[in-house]
Image (cartoon, rainbow, N blue to C red):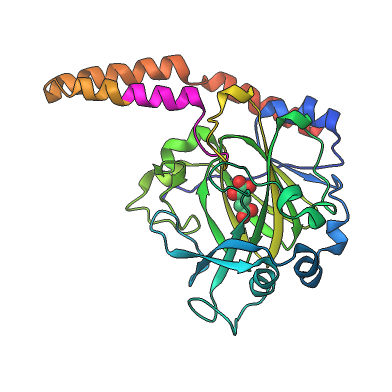
């Protein structure tokens, strides 16, 4: 069987705004940043402290009987709990109060005030806790889009997906494994919208997903205090090795008008991409007027045109890798 390539995500210590902007950001590749200074949260955020300072506002959480959450087949339910109760439950392995079963798993992805319109912002939803968290200053303040709590039970695994904005995933407590795949490997991931259908990435069903082995697997383990830079469009899959609290910060990498204005989650395709996909649907519909052999012929020619016009060349991809390596070795 073909072996999936496994690549460690580079780790860099003591990166400041200037180094980030010059050496890391332009490479468009994930990097783990150590010692960026996340603030007092690193010492303060025990379960009791979080429960006390986070208060009892209601939060909507994902709950499932198994730790591997599956968005495509919805093997979880949404429930609401006061934040302080949620934190206590997420931190324990067995629950005396539960929704589905004693060992159910929890996941919080915090939301904005008006969930359909407003992006999450820790400073608005959890002002007392936000004081303890210092957002790494790797982008300009007007590029900020959202800051999102990511709180998971031990063992919780979140499906592989991409987002359309640049992202800093800061791990505050607990360890988390993150597996990433390049946007260039999208065709090996069996996408359904922004999510991969391959759920079990460690032991994939290769009869159903034979191409999956071709996707290069980038991997890292985040310790408390680590920040993972996830460039827009990079697929990521997270596995909480312990109960853990993380915060991810999305920001606008493209001019603000490129993004869908009705997208509080940061995962709707940019306006131009959405339009191009609609135009493609219309083009395919038009081709349906022809018999199969003509569709095949013109379909192949269209694929070739799209490739010629849009794919980065092998050479430019190789150059980019070499450039990243040099910058990281310096
Ligand atoms: O850390 C997690 O649980 C998921 C993070 C994530 O999906 C993100 O930062 O976009």
Residue range highlighted in magenta: 266-280
Residue lying at the far bottom in this picture: please name it: 96
Residue 307, position in %: x, y?
41, 19
Relative to residue 239, is residue 282 depicted above or below? above
What residue is at 74 percent from the left and 31 percent from the top?
A: 24
207 is within the stretch colored magenta: no
What residue is at 55 percent from the left and 60 percent from the top?
A: 157
Residue 96, position in %: x, y?
59, 85
278 is within the stretch colored magenta: yes
12, 136: nearer the viewer = 136
201, 271: nearer the viewer = 271
157, 212: nearer the viewer = 157
Q: In terms of image quadrants, where is residue 25? A: top right
- Answer yes or no: is residue 178 visible: no
Q: In terms of image quadrants, where is residue 43? A: bottom right
Residue 41, position in %: x, y?
83, 57
* In this rendering, position of residue 188 left or right of residue 181: left
Relative to residue 207, is residue 152 depicted above or below? below
Relative to residue 92, is residue 195 depicted above or below? above
Q: Quadrant of the C terminus?
A: top right
- Answer yes or no: is residue 89 visible: yes
Residue lying at the far left in this picture: please name it: 291
Relative to residue 239, is residue 184 depicted above or below? above
Residue 100, position in %: x, y?
48, 76
* In this rendering, position of residue 95 left or right of residue 53: left
What residue is at 36 percent from the left and 49 percent from the top?
A: 209
294, 94: nearer the viewer = 94
């Amino acid at each position: 069987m073909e072996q999936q390539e496994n690549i460690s995500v580079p780790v860099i210590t003591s990166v400041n705004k200037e180094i980030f902007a010059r050496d890391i950001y332009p490479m468009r590749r994930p990097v783990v940043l150590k010692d960026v200074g996340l603030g007092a949260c690193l010492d303060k955020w025990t379960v009791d402290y979080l429960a006390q300072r986070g208060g009892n506002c209601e939060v909507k959480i994902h709950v499932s009987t198994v730790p591997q959450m599956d968005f495509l087949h919805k093997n979880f339910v949404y429930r609401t709990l006061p934040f302080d109760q949620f934190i206590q439950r997420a931190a324990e392995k067995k629950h005396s109060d539960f929704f589905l079963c004693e060992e159910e798993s929890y996941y919080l992805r915090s939301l904005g005030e008006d969930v359909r319109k407003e992006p999450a912002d820790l400073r608005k939803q959890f002002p007392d806790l936000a004081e303890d968290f210092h957002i790494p200053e790797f982008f300009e303040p007007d590029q900020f889009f959202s800051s999102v709590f990511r709180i998971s039970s031990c063992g919780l695994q979140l499906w592989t997906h991409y987002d359309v904005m640049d992202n800093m995933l800061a791990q505050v407590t607990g360890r988390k494994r993150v597996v990433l795949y390049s946007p260039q490997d999208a065709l090996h991931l069996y996408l359904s919208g922004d999510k991969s259908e391959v759920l079990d990435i460690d032991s994939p069903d290769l009869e159903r997903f034979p191409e999956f082995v071709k996707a290069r697997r980038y991997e890292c383990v985040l310790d408390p205090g680590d920040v993972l830079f996830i460039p827009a469009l990079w697929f990521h899959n997270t596995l909480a090795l312990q109960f853990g609290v993380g915060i991810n910060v999305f920001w606008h990498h493209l001019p603000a008008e490129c993004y869908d204005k009705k997208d509080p989650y940061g995962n709707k395709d940019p306006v131009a991409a959405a339009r191009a996909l609609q135009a493609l649907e219309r083009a395919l519909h038009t081709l349906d007027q022809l018999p199969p052999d003509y569709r095949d012929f013109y379909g192949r020619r269209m694929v070739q045109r799209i490739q010629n016009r849009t794919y980065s060349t092998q050479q430019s991809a190789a150059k980019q890798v070499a450039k990243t390596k040099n910058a990281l070795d310096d």
